[in-house]
């Protein structure tokens, strides 16, 4: 079984001072950096997914801005793939699936941002495509939401989405647990 790390949307706009700051982005970025270093030390593939917004009137991930750039904590190294996407699902209209098949990857470790959007849709798609998925819960970040007049704090959003993914779609673990199994 061949394993790859897929780092989804760890981009400047999600960090303090960015156009869409997420709760816990700094900490999640640091944990993702540790995970990337563990993969690199074992010469395992690291794949970066970068969201470029093509929606008219988009306020973040706007092409040509500093905010769209991959954050320095997980900056791609020479030889690491960078897949650009325009939708939350990292497989939709991208070469990601073909890249993974070409490399004979069957298991994905996923880290990134936003848990309730791009991480959720990417992990579910990967599981549907037959990949074994491991999700690094402490290398993900999200934001507070609201629905029907009810405010949902970021910590509750994070917990709910991780709980929903754990089991059928992914095995949700900490970065330390994942690093111990590489």
Image: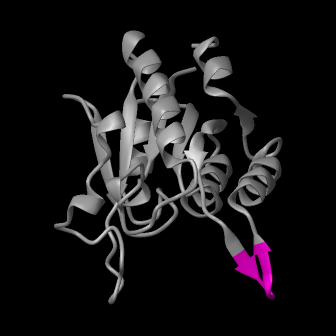
Q: Residue furthest front?
A: 17
Task: Specify the segment rendered in magenta.
Answer: 146-151
In the picture shown, does residue 24 fall above or below 55? above
Residue 111 quadrant? top right
Horizontal side of residue 126 vs 40, given as left or right: right
Vertical arrangement, residue 129 with respect to residue 78, above or below: below
Q: Nearer the viewer, residue 131 or 9?
A: 9
Residue 28 in percent (x, y) is at 53, 40
What is the quadrant of residue 79 in the picture? top left
158 on left or right of 166: left
Q: Position of residue 114 (x, y in %)?
A: 55, 58
Q: Residue at x 65, y 61 (%)?
A: 116
Q: Main secondary structure of the magenta part?
A: strand
* Residue 149, magenta (yes or no): yes
* Vertical arrangement, residue 103 with respect to residue 159, above or below: above
Q: Is residue 71 above or below residue 107?
A: below
Tell me if residue 41 is in the magenta stretch: no
Image quarter where the C terminus lies is: top right
Q: Residue 82 versus residue 16: which sits nearer the camera?
A: 16
**Image spot of residue 82 (x, y percent):** 29, 45
Please report the residue visible at 31 percent of the width from the left and 78 percent of the height from the top.
54
């Amino acid at each position: 079984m061949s394993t790859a790390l897929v780092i989804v949307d760890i981009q400047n706009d999600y960090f303090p001072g960015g156009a869409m700051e997420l709760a816990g982005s700094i900490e999640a970025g640091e944990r993702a950096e540790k995970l990337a270093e563990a993969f690199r030390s074992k010469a395992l593939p690291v794949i970066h997914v970068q969201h470029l917004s093509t929606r008219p009137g988009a306020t973040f991930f706007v092409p040509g801005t500093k905010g769209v750039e991959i954050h320095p904590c997980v900056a791609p190294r020479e030889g690491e793939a960078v897949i650009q996407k325009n939708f939350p699902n990292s497989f939709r209209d991208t070469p990601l699936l073909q890249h993974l098949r070409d490399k004979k990857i069957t298991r994905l470790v996923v880290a990134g941002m936003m848990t309730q959007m791009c991480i959720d849709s990417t992990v579910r798609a990967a599981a549907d495509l037959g990949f074994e998925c491991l999700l690094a819960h402490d290398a993900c970040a999200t934001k507070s939401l609201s629905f029907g007049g009810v405010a949902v704090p970021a910590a509750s959003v994070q917990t709910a989405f991780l709980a929903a993914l754990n089991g059928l779609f992914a095995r949700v673990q900490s970065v330390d647990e994942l690093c111990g199994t590489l």
